[in-house]
Structure formats: structure tokens, C-alpha cells
Image (spheres, coloured by chain):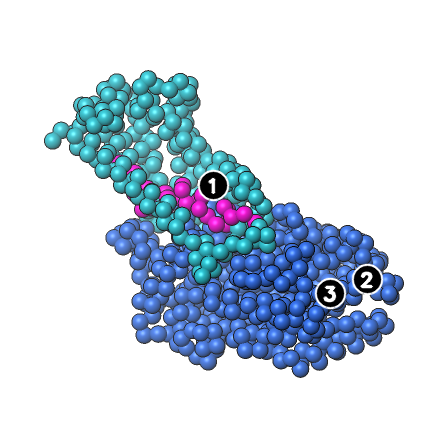
Chain colours: A cyan, B blue
Amino acid sequence: MSLSVIYAILFYFATLLFIVGVARKIVIYARTPAPLKIPTMPAPLTKKGVAWRLTKEVVVFRSLFNANKWIWLFGWLFHVGLLLVLLRHLRYVTEPVWTWVVLIQPFGKYAAFAMLIGLFGLWARRFLVDRIRYISSPSDHLMLMLLIAIGLSGLGMTYIDHTDIVSLKAYVLGLMYFDIQPLPSNLYLITHLTLVVILMIIFPISKLIHAPGLFFSPTRNQVDNSRDVRHTAGWTAK
Amino acid sequence: MADFDTPVLKEYPIIPLIKKGSMAHSKPYVAKPDIQAGVGFPGELVDNWQEVGVKKLGELVSGSRALQVFLDTCVKCGACTDKCHYYLGTSDPLNMPVARQDLLRSVYRRYYTFAGKFFPKLVGAKDFTKDVLDKWYSYFHQCSQCRRCSVFCPYGIDTAEVSMAAREILDTVGVGQKYCNEILGKVHKIGNNLGLPKPALVDTMEGLEEDIKDETGIDVRVPVDQKGADVLLITPSADFFAEPHIDGLIGYAKVFHQAGISWTVSSYASEAANFSMFIGSNENLLKTATRIRDAAYDLGVKRIVVGECGHAWRVAYSFWNTLFKDMDFLDKKYPMPSHICEVTHDLIQRGALKINKEANDHRRITFHDSCNVARGSRMGNIPGGQFIIPREVIKACANNFYDMAPETIHENTFCCGGGGGLLTDDLMELRVKGALPRMEALKQVVDEYDVNTFVAICAICKTQFAKTLPYYKFDMDMITSLHQIVGDSLELGTND
């Protein structure tokens, strides 16, 4: 079997696990009852207010900012960098490439560095700060190594050994239409894709599930209206 | 004083380096079988405890979205590691919120997640062994469920929920904590934490009326079981006898008296506290709270007012409407329930109280936000009212008020060190060390503004501070009930 086919199968497999795994978790979170009102106060009095509270958490990591400026700085750099890099990657799956994706292209390139600075900063804290060293398990280190390796292998293609971007795009578009095209052979590319496949597979069964989890956190998503509206769920609804 | 060193108050708070195992010896007394029976749990460690415990854990997680999300989403970022007063006071790394959660999370992972079942070492999953059980007992009784960590966690993970679940599992396998479970048994049997029966309660209240008469020359009623009263006051039973709590109760009585509000306490539900929350027991939570609903119904009151008690106000504010099925007999004009500070604040706003602020001029006051009020409830009709209203009441009744440092008040407040079911003498070392961050903040305002009065609105805080202030070379009389400040400033004779 050719490399093109093996990676096609790997990608279909990983995508399936990723989607099913994340969807399963979201269904579990949505179905598990929240029997009591436990928002961390002061909390918004309206649903709109809650949406704003969550927006601040997602966009600027408000609680983390209040907690620790270093973790916030590195964490936010990484996430914003990752977002831009992911958006930049849209050019591989759209034809013609959407205009706004073209426009962010130059930023997306440097975002990879922001992402890596963030990741190295976070990793350094796992060694340098005794409290964080204590709470880190092997998987916490491996997760950072995986993300760093993904970033470095990506940068490798941009700055060291250019891959054939045109045939790569043909390959990716082919994947989308179940018409397997030849995958360009490039060590950085193969490494990059392999690691991304691993990331997609472990996403739903690891702490990476924090991404959808945040939206279901009762301390953040509940409205402070317990005196006005009777809330029941689970054992309190019986 | 016990055989441990009281931490030294530093000029500026510093985050200590970890000292592994420094509080591993801290364990509260285990409940005897008769006490366990009183709250519906096995009397001693059941034979198949491992199986029972793991099964219970699964049930709890599938019944609580909070637990499900909290156990899954922690990324070990470390934001919470320096936020717990017990970590800051003891340096024991297992008192860092994430590490405390991990005691339970590692077991959850082992039995309920793919990664933990197949790669336990990699993700730090652990079998539920006797050693783990013992660690749970020790360290889940070093959490006062104050929720400070949940303020700073980027996902809002609340260690209180995890520690409640752990205690519920411990109870389910037969290892309960004596202090909480004994007290809960008394509430079920007699109606209050102290086991104070009706005749003793009536006697105490009559004594109180005499005391007020001696002090002010005015007949102020402190009624028990008065049918048809407008207000049922639900207050922690410590208010009936302990210092400085009782002066708060006198304050409530004076407020009701001057405002002309008819009120009563109930001998059937003579307790605001609901320790069921501390042990995470839903059955006990409902059972304890229902006494209050029934007392209100039987007495035919129009509204329920809750006295100065932190976790009781959280249970009342956040849970009563959920727990009580039928409250239609109450007057809809008033919030159900109301906090005594809301009542007093409202009366002050409407000019219904005659206040002489100078009566408090000998006091230089600061205010301690109790954790359950600050992070588990609200007062008034705007977010943060729980910070504004008590301070407004103090400032309306006294001239000298000084807040502690902003990072130690409002939602950032530090626990007194004795909340969450830890207010027992067998945990004295933990209580003293856990008070450190609050004591450091207090020292700042004492040094800077000569503060001599430390006001709280929680029975546990008051008892805890009365006990721990001397360890830090403060005068224990500094701790004062908010409604003592109010009561002392009221000009009682003038409105009659």
C-alpha cells in the first residue's frame, strides 16, 4: 500500500475518532444533570450576562489572567497562535482560498512562533516552578512535546525544506472528495501529519477536552437567579 | 496551645515552596457507629469498600455535570496552586487545589476513563487502595470548600464539589467524620447543631430579653414559636449562646423591634446551619432544609430571614428554592429567603431605623467577607451585592471603616480557616495555619489604620477567629458580629 493510501486511511480514522469522541463527550456533558445552582459568585443575573462571562473566558482567559500572569501570557500566546495557524491551514481545504484566509496568511506565518513561545514557556514552568513540577504527570509533558513537535515540523516546511504545496493541496482536497491523490514525500510533512493524527485521536480522551468542557462548567455557565426561578435537575427534580 | 508552630506573619505574603507530607498527620476523629447511624451511613469500613466506593464515585459523576466536567477538563496549568489558604499556611503540596482534586481524579481515571484503564502510569491514574482512602480522609478534611480556587480556575473547577463528593464516598464506605456527622444527627433529632431542646431555648431567649432590658431599659422581645409572626428568623444556633455571636442576635432583635416587625425563631428548626453540604450528602441536605420549610408553614409566617451564617446563607439563597416544593404560602413581596443584612439595609434606606453612629466611635472596623456568602450567594439585586450591602450597613452605623487589601476581600476573600466542617479542636493545627493569609491581611490594616474591630457575618468565622486570633497575637475580642455594630448604634427609645 502506498504512503498516500496509508495516510488517507489514518486521516479518515483519526477524524472519525475525533468527531465521534468529542460529540460523545458533549452529549455526556449536556445530559448529565446539574441538580443545584452553583455559579461562582458574583455571577451574571441573565443568560446574556452568562454569554458575556463565557466570551471573556474564551477570548481573553479572564480568570487565568486574574490568577497568574505568566501562565496567562504563555497560555494565551499559544492558543491565539494556534487559532491563527489553524485558520491559515484553511487554505489547504478551500479552492479558491477564501479572501480572509489570504489576508491573515502573513500573520499566520508568525503565529507559529507565538504558539511555540507559549508552549516552551508553559513547558519551562513544569520544570522551574516547584508547585507545577509537583502536579505534572508524564502525559502533561508528552502533550506539550507533541504540540511542540507539530509546530516545529510545520515550521520545518516553511523555513527549511519546502514541501510541494500544490500537490499537498491536491492530496488534501482529494481526501475530501474520496479521490486519493499522491502525497508529496517530505520528512517534515510526514512527521507533521503523523503527529496531528495522534493529536486528533487523543483529543477526546485526554485533558484536551477542556475546550468544549468550559462551556458546560456550572460554576461559569449558570445564571444567578435562584431566588426568582426554581431550578431543578437530576435528584432535585424527583 | 497545641504542639505546632504558629506561622509568622510576614510583611508581604509569599508563596511557600512545597514541603511534601507536612500535613499528612492531620486527620479529624472518625465517627463512631452510632453517629454514622444518625445520618444514615454504615458504622465502620464495609468489607467490599473498594467496590462500593468506586461504584458510588461513578454514580456521583453521572449525577453531577459539575463533577463530570471538573474531573475531565483540568489541564494542570497551575493557576490554582497558590490560591488555597491551607496550602499557603501549611506548604503541603496536597493542599494545592489541583493536587487535592487529583486524589480523587486519579481514582476516577483508573476506573472510568480509557487512558486510566490502559495507561495508568502515563496519566497518573491510581487504584483505590487503603492508602488512597486514608489520604482522602486526611486531605479532603483539609479543604474548607471555600471555592477560592474556582474563582481563578480558567474552567471554573470548584474543589468544593470534588471534596463534597469525596466525603460522600467516605461516608458511604463507612468512614465518616465525627464532628460533622454528630452535629447533623443532632439537627435531625432535636433541631439544632447544639442539641438544645425547646425548654432550654426558651430559657435562653428569656435571659436574653432580660439582658437587653438591663442594658437599654427597653422591652425587646426575642420570641420562640410565635404563631402568626411575620418573620421566621433562621439563624445559626451559635447565635443563642456563643460569643460574639449572641451580640449579633441581640442586634437582630433590636432591628426588628425598632422597625416594628413581628418575628420569631422556631424550636423545631432552630438551626440555619446545614452541614449536609459539607459532607456532600443530598439526602441529609434535603432532610435538614425541609425542617425549616415545615416550621415556616406551621408558624404561618410571611417571610423567612436568615441570620449571620455563611454556608447557611449559601444553602438558603442558592438551594432552598430548588429543595422546597411548595413555598406559595409565603408573601411574594419579599425575596425568599432574605438575609438579615438585606433586611437591615432596606430599613436603613427607608429611614426606619434611628442610628447614632457615634456610638461606634471607639471602634475602627474592617470586614471579613465570608467565603460562602462571597462566592456562593448574593444579597440585594445586583451582582456583588453581597459585598456592598454588609459594608453599607456597617458604614451607616459606624464612622471608622477600613477595607483589607483588595486581593483578600470580595470574591478574592480568604477563608477564616475553619469552614466546611473543619471547625473542630482535633484540627486545631490546620485551623491556625489555614488562618494565616487572612491574618496577614488583617495585620496590614491593624498596622496602618489601628483597626480594632474585625466584623464577620458567619458563625463559623466568628468561632474560628475567636479561637485563632490569639495564636497570632491579636485580641480575641476583635471579632465582632455585624449586627452588634448595628445594635449598638440603634437609639431604641426614640421610635416608640
- Residue bearing mark 2: B490
Residue A159 x %, y %: 32, 22
On screen, residue B264 versus residue B396, left or right, reads left
Q: Which secondary structure lies at badge 1?
A: helix
Q: Which residue corresponds to the image point at 38% horizontal and 27% vertical from the top-left?
A: A87
Q: Is residue B178 visible?
A: yes
Disc 1: which residue: A71
Residue A220 falls within the magenta-colored stretch? yes
Residue B358: percent from left, percent from top: 84, 58
- As shown in the figure, which amino acid type bears the numbered disc 3? Tyr
Q: Residues within 10 Å of mark 2 (few under 14, many from 20)?
A: many
**Over which residues does the magenta segment extend?**
A197-224
Residue at the (76%, 56%) spot, across then down: B347
Q: Amino acid type of disc 2?
A: Leu
Tag 1 near tag 3, CB within 8 Å: no
Q: Secondary structure at mark 3?
A: helix
Q: Chain of mark 3?
A: B
The circle drawn on residue B252 is: 3
User: Is label 1 or label 3 in front?
Assistant: 3
